Amino acid sequence: MTGATEAGFAALRRLRARGGADGQRCELCGEALEAAHGHLLEVPERQVRCCCRACRLLFEHPGAGAGRLRAIPGEVVPLAEPVAGDWWARLGLPVGVVFVVVDDAGQPSAAFPGAAGAAWAELEGASWRALGDAHPEVQHLLPEVQAFFLYHPGRGWPLAGPGEGWVVPIDTCYELVGALRQSWRGFDGGPAAQAVVARFRGRLAEAMTERTTVSGSRR
């Protein structure tokens, strides 16, 4: 990393410390933010940063910021077809609520939200590619900043019947992880965790119905 890049990230860290003192501010330039605003992903640390529209546009271009900061898209895309229950077993997913992210090399990793946050595990590539053949929407995930969210209501194993699949912004998945961590009780999360997941699925459906992004800003 060049000295100029190091200095730039040092400046970003200073702005982050300043932001929020007098209201929510862009973590790059310090501009005051509206309630509905954009986000960037700081890739190495998987940290979500709030940003203004101008700063977000800077990082929409591939390679901007050496790929360390990337604009998180707001769109929600439901799969055209339900996800068969046997995909959970084929992908090695032990729970019904999971999201999958791919890195720049195309390697998929699954995150399982729970009481301690999210547990991560790499997925087997051939099974992931087979899922992409069955559901082409997942073939075009933007690395790191989009996720494939999977939900199945079943409790037995193997899971029977179809589940749901959505392509969603990664920041909403991290919000879900935080909310589940706070609400989780017992082995399976309990009613409070189930209510969190239900509200999250409702947000996805609302985003499609009202043509908004999942963060609430109009497209």
Image (cartoon, rainbow, N blue to C red):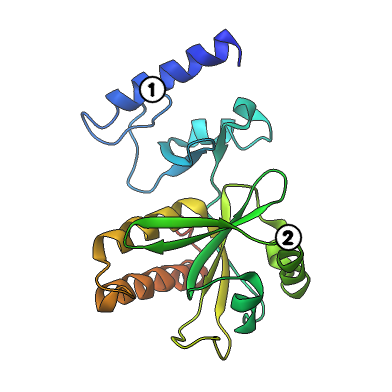
Q: Is residue 174 left or right of residue 80?
A: left
Q: Which residue in the structure is indicated by mark 1?
A: 13
Q: Is residue 13 left or right of residue 125?
A: left
Q: Nearer the viewer, residue 90 or 39?
A: 90
Q: At x 25% / y 65%, what residue is drawn?
A: 183
Q: At x 58% / y 33%, what residue is drawn?
A: 59
Q: Nearer the viewer, residue 154 or 42?
A: 154
Q: Residues within 10 Å of mark 1 (few under 14, many from 20)?
A: some
Judged from the image, the secondary structure of the residue bearing numbered disc 2 is: helix
Q: Is residue 23 left or right of residue 129?
A: left
> Is 212 above or below relative to 165?
above
Which one is earlier in the sequence, the residue at label 2 or at label 1?
1
Residue 169 in the image: state x and y as whole percent.
Answer: 52, 55
Q: Which residue in the structure is indicated by mark 2?
A: 125
> Is 48 above or below relative to 218?
above
The answer to whether residue 157 is visible is yes
Where on the picture, by quarter, is residue 166?
A: bottom right
**Label 2 close to label 1 by CB (< 8 Å):** no
Screen quadrant of the N terminus = top right
